[in-house]
Image (cartoon, rainbow, N blue to C red):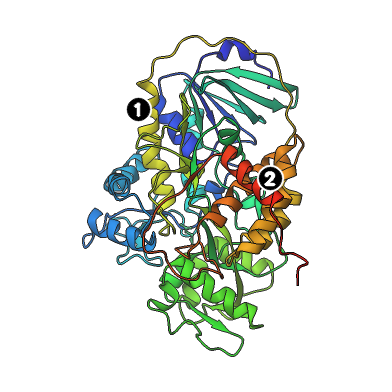
Amino acid sequence: MNADVRSFFGRPIIVGGGIAGLMTALHLAPEPVLLLSRNRLGTDASSTWAQGGLAASVGDDDSPTLHLADTLAAGDGLCDEEIASRILRAAPDAIETLAGFGVRFDRTPEGKLRLGQEAAHGRRRIVHAGGDCSGREVMRALVSAVHSTPSIVVVEGVEARRLAVKENAVRGIWASCSMGSVFFGSRRVVLATGGIGGLFFDTTNPLGSCGQGLALAARAGAVLSDLEFIQFHPTALDGPGRPMQLISEAIRGEGATIVDETGRRFLEGLEGIELAPRDIVARAVWKHLSKGHRVFLDTREKPGTAFAVQFPTIASACRDVGIDPGRDLIPIRPAQHYHMGGVAVDADGRTSVAGLWACGEVASTGLHGANRLASNSLTEAVVCARWVAESLLGTTVRRTKPAITNDYPSPDPTTVRSLLSRALGIVRDSESLKATARALLPLADGNDAASDPAAVGLMIAIAALWREESRGAHYRADFPHRAAIARRFEITLADALAAARELAHSPSLEGAG
Ligand code: SIN
């Protein structure tokens, strides 16, 4: 980074170079903006890895009402129906917008969008690009559009470390780059930093995604919501590689089955079988593995020989570990895949801190509820980016003053990863959540490399502890049923620290009896 940052003072800043960040920047044009990215654009965003595509009711037999019904059913009583309806009604237009930016979607010979099927969708409504590399194609087109938009200044190799906040309003960002610490003054910041996969051993996401946006917002005093809802994808390739290779649900949509080492389709008792909602399939696979079985995706008959043509990226990843999906079973296990919770935002993406917006996986709009319907998240990112941009453009701002440079350590999630992987996986219980909160407290309270990942982990652990029921992706062994009343929880870092301090002073059952 060699430009004089003072020349950018006052510009809106977008933190994050995935689909949500790029779309927000493009919708803001011709307003000059600064887009900060940790890596070269398009290289380390989970958006680039997305196989599934975008859900939109564009089929002749479909409608936003049907799409909404499936979204609400998967969300298990916790979706915000008004927001969900608004986002899903805008989904078909979002596909058109992307096509306008040059995204080459998969089409039939007649030129219509080719629609895929995924779990818990009552219709074929997943729009793909390049078969199983939808994210890569969308990113290719958007990165190229951003590079040819003169109002967007992209600054790569920069990590945002803290938001400067005064009287609950944003004043800028402290960041670090190869040249050291730097302050970007701005009263308008959009967080588009992605998810939390790097906080788990078993994840399908880039390991660098370890909740930095949540930490930035939380340390600025923002309200977060639904943090306990973490989606585990049932079919990640069970091998030594980390992050794990996702084996797309679209393959089950084409007829692949889930079997164990005896060849039994052990999900047969579930409604929807392999295409039941993702949380249900993931728990059933996890339970079967816990009993000592091995679990496989059987693609030999369906999609069979069409596999390599329909799913070229996955076929190639399988071949790399000696598996031929047309002939062999694919070993699978669940892995962390998506965070439904995030920074609480209103319909325009505004957070509880003035001048701070959030968009994409880092945000909690209320669309996903307790369990995200497959392929609704890229759709959400594209749709909401427009509303965030419009809201930001409608805000008038005063000049920002320079601030002294501050140093904050680069986050390292190693310690936190082992704690969260144990206590915040597919099945949770009070004692392990409490023990994890106690262990995370001193880390979150400190100021070293583990502090920000620990603060994020602590808020998730406390939110999971507060939810004394099982709903959607949150399953408590000690509270296996749904509560009579469905309600969403909000949390701040101060709440989580206070709750953890109380736990630290209360007697632990560990070692008792
Ligand atoms: C998949 O392709 O299975 C993932 C789709 C998604 O997570 O939305």
Image coordinates for residue 9, horizontal then vertical, percent:
55, 13
Q: Which label sits in the foreground, 1 or 2?
A: 2
- Please name the residue shown 55% across and 56% down the image: 464
**Which quadrant would residue 347 be assigned to in this image?**
top left
Q: Nearer the viewer, residue 157 or 67?
A: 67
Image coordinates for residue 393, horizontal then vertical, percent:
37, 22
Amino acid, disc 2: Ala
Horizontal relation, residue 126 to residue 67: left or right: right
Image coordinates for residue 380, horizontal then vertical, percent:
39, 46
The answer to which of marks 1 and 2 sits earlier in the sequence is: 1
Q: Is residue 135 visible?
A: yes
Question: Which residue corresponds to mark 1?
Answer: 390
- Please name the residue shown 61% across and 71% down the image: 333
Amino acid, disc 1: Glu
- Please name the residue shown 58% across and 67% down the image: 427
Question: Which residue corresponds to mark 2?
Answer: 454
